[in-house]
Amino acid sequence: MKIRIIALGALAGGLLTAALTAVLYLANQLLNLPFVPFDLFNWVTRVLPGDLVTFGIDTMINIMLFLGVNVAESAKTAERISAVLQFMALGILVGALYFAVMSWRRSNGDRFAGLLVGALFGLPLAAISLAITQSDVFPVLSLAWIIAAFLIWGLALNEAYAHLVRIPEPEDEETRLVLRRDRRRFLIQLGAGTALITIAGAGLGTVLKRLEDRRTLAESTDEMVHNSEPGAESPFPNAGDPVVPVPGTRPEYTPVKDHYKVFIQTEPTLIDEASWVLPITGLVDNPQMLTLEDFKTRWDSIDQYVTLSCISGRIGTSLISTTQWTGVSAQDVLADLGLQEGAQYLVITSGDGFYETVDIDLIMSEPRIMFCYAWDGNDLPKDHGFPLRIWIPDRYGMKQPKWITEIEVTAEYQEGYWVERNWDEVAQVKTTSVIDTVAVDHLIEDGDQRRVPIGGIAFSGARGISAVQVRVDGGEWQDAQLRSPLSETTWVIWRYEWPFEEGQHLFEVRCRELDGTPQIEEQTDNRPSGATGIDSVEATIMG
Ligand SMILES: Nc1nc2c(c(=O)[nH]1)N[C@H]1C(S)=C(S)[C@@H](COP(=O)(O)O)O[C@H]1N2
Ligand SMILES: [Mo]
């Protein structure tokens, strides 16, 4: 068997699969038909063993850190690229196999075989896609679309085979030359044709996606409660605090559009408000079917400024943000359930296949645990768990399901999604402090003295911050000033003014919780329990 034939098959398979990907993507953006490459990737990560998935994510993040890429912004992009590459690899493999088998059968191309390979490739993918897709298109239509697309792909692959392979190769030199010229011409046409489809489909799809993103963002920021217009009275409880953030410190209140996002699938989960009802079943006398309206009206609402952070963040991570959460106390909801003897856990399931378990004793001891339906005064954004998510103070995000679709009250403990994948079962937030800025461009002149303002955040979950200290070039730890936080469950903004000294310096920060417990200074990895260690920054200060 000739390597050249297999290579041609791989090439044809790759080119045609690129075009197929673009067409599927465009149909996804235009008509919300399933996008097979993402569905396949999500399915693969769901069925693979947890260890392997964790290893894969770790490897990806380590490569990104090594390359200096912003993990918070790029992790999803990397995942989506992986998904498309995975799909491309499959297409290349099928192309190579098709050429190999056909030449082994000494065929010069056969439409029926092309249809067959399209069906063999497309049917399993269609099944996976339909099982997992978030598309709300009628399944029969989705199925028809996917099968049609893959049949055409198979026909095109066979067409390529018929043009590129001739069995047996002609003997006389002249016919061979003609054949070679025809092949070259066909390859150029194939390359140009697939490139055109790929670019047009991907380009148009991207434009549509941008428009859609802009529209949903506009919706979610419509009536921002906290859009303090110039001159308007500040809505924040610490507005009058004399300790103001150093320029370059991150915003104390994160604009919702900038809030970090973490979700297990390649795309956020879409839940339709009209059809969403939350069943609460299991060991209860009064099972419930709750609508979003029920959550908004049946119990008293509570507002809470909350800093949420992700356990997978390294020291100084951008996977941490602050906004105002609104919802109802989980205690109030439990009170209406008529918990039966032995009821011990809420097993929460989400629309994206995520799940976590919350101990009822924890809820009974912590009235702030809330079923949350609004952020920053608006319904939850779709990326952040619309219509309902839970908030548990003092815990990392991994314990707190978004897009809740089902709650079962049980006597049995069940490990959560990330717990099963080797992350900490409790996931209590590790106290941390971060230097956001050494503001060399904002020197403070004070008589003969000049000082360099340094600023950042400190966060301890719900345990509060009593002190932040900065040291320079390994000298004495000096107390920073603390701004009063938005609430006892948000980060604290701190500032420290350092007497001016020219040169290159190393700045380090550490903090203490309200009860005096120091943050852990020893460097540990994010897994399994959240990163610890001291954040440091080097800066050069010039006269
Ligand atoms: N259903 C669901 N809930 C989830 C997740 C998820 O992937 N699916 N990710 C969790 C993790 S690991 C974090 S850090 C937070 C992130 O919430 P955010 O995206 O709103 O910032 O959501 C948590 N809840
Ligand atoms: Mo997370």
Image: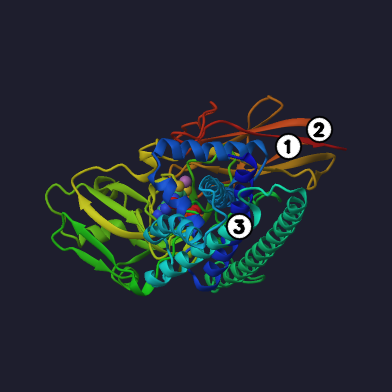
- As shown in the figure, which amino acid type bears the numbered disc 1? Trp
Pinpoint residue 523: horizontal percent, then vertical percent. 55, 27
Q: Secondary structure at mark 1?
A: strand
- On the rendered structure, is 138 left or right of 188? left
- Residue 162, disc: 3
Q: Residues within 10 Å of mark 2 (few under 14, many from 20)?
A: some
Closest to the observer, 473 or 451? 473
Instruction: Tell me whether the residue at label 1 lies in contact with that at label 2, contact meaning CB atoms closer than 8 angstroms.
Output: yes
Q: Secondary structure at mark 2?
A: loop
Looking at the image, is 178 positioned above or below residue 138?
Answer: above
Label 2 and label 3: CA atoms lie apart by 76 Å
- Residue 501, disc: 2
- Residue 498, disc: 1
Label 1 and label 2: CA atoms lie apart by 9 Å
- As shown in the figure, which amino acid type bears the numbered disc 3? Ala
Pinpoint residue 183: horizontal percent, then vertical percent. 71, 55
Looking at the image, is 150 positioned above or below residue 46?
Answer: below
Quadrant containing the C terminus in the rendered view: top right
Instruction: Give whichever of discs 1 and 3 has the lower sequence position.
Output: 3
**At x 62% / y 39%, what residue is drawn?**
3
